[in-house]
Image (spheres, rainbow, N blue to C red):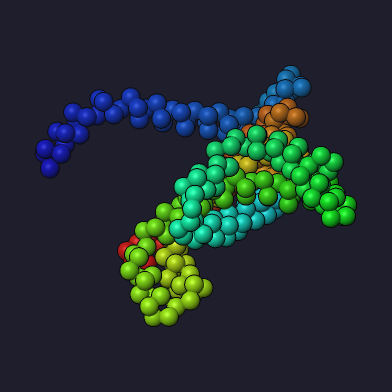
Amino acid sequence: MSQTLDSSRRTLPLVAPSVVVLFLWMIVPLAMTIYFSLLRYNLLDPGSRGFAGIDNFVFLLTDPAFVTSIWNTVVLVGSVLILTVVGGTLMAVLFDQEFPGRGVARVLAIAPFFVMPTVAALVWKNLMMHPVNGLFAWLLSSIGLEPIDWFTHYPMLSVILIVAWQWIPFAFLILLTAIQSLDPEQKEAARLDGASGLELFRFIILPHLKRAISVVVMIETIFLLSVFAEIRITTSGGPGTDTTNLTYLVFQFGLQQFDIGSASAGGIVAVVLANVVAFFLVRSVARELKPGA
């Protein structure tokens, strides 16, 4: 015990500076956001600055756009999670099989994950979904159908497809690693017992992927709550508020309306909601990762 204490005292001077920096790195921005959320502070009218109490929070929570942004956030996150988990699972099963050029195919499959969100949004907006020059418009025209203006008629679906395209490779990597950790003898025994490919997937592979899927859902949810670039580049939150999520609503308050107080209040609400979601997700994943779960 005394040796442990002595070791801790010796390493404390080395560890303390990094701990202090990390603490300040997290606490100072959060403290400033809380401070501004309690002020009446608009950059277009700096002279009216004063203490507002909870007025900014009341204004935010009673704004009809807030309820819409929460619903859009839920729809976006839920839809992308479904697409990425299903798509990632199917890709992982496919790429676990032996076929010529599998290594190159795997590299190409994970490539979208390394594309910056802004670049991905521009590619999809101008090369894939453009109603005149896009690939989808050309395909529809080639079979005699009318091209679709995706970002006007199906704005949320368009954003969901773009974000899912970026995150499917992440789910694919995690789930492929999990499949490769499955004992080959277990699969071979199932085949010898006459199990079909569908039965092998349902009763052996899918239960084995349960924990990996939980990890994918947790990590993706935390990041998907802050989707911004794809919305900014493609729809700018519209038409109307059809694609305005909570992150984009905070952006509108802060950098379009210059209402720093309301934007800070929105940031605090977003942090609280994200931490609540993360708390339950971490507990769920922790239960899955327990031995014998």
Indicate whether 178 appears above or below 269: below
Q: How far across and how far down the image is residue 159, in percent? A: 70, 46
Q: Residue at x 47, y 31 (%)?
A: 27
Does residue 66 appear in this view? no
Please, which residue is most extreme toward the front here? Answer: 100
- Please tell me in which quadrant of the rendered image residue 115 appears: top right
Please, which residue is most extreme toward the top here? Answer: 47
Q: How far across and how far down the image is residue 5, in percent? A: 16, 36
The foreground one among 174 and 5 is 174
The foreground one among 192 and 34 is 192
The foreground one among 13 and 37 is 13
Indicate whether 94 appears above or below 159: below
Q: Residue at x 35, y 75 (%)?
A: 189
In the figure, is residue 204 to the left or right of 254? left
Please, which residue is most extreme toward the bottom here? Answer: 193
Indicate whether 271 appears above or below 280: above
Q: Residue at x 81, y 47 (%)?
A: 137
Counting the numbered discs, the total is 0
The quadrant of the picture occupied by the N terminus is top left
In the figure, is residue 117 to the left or right of 97? right
Please, which residue is most extreme toward the left here? Answer: 2
Q: How far across and how far down the image is residue 46, in percent? A: 72, 20
The quadrant of the picture occupied by the C terminus is bottom left
Q: How far across and how far down the image is residue 22, in percent? A: 41, 30
Does residue 108 appear in this view? yes
The foreground one among 269 and 129 is 129
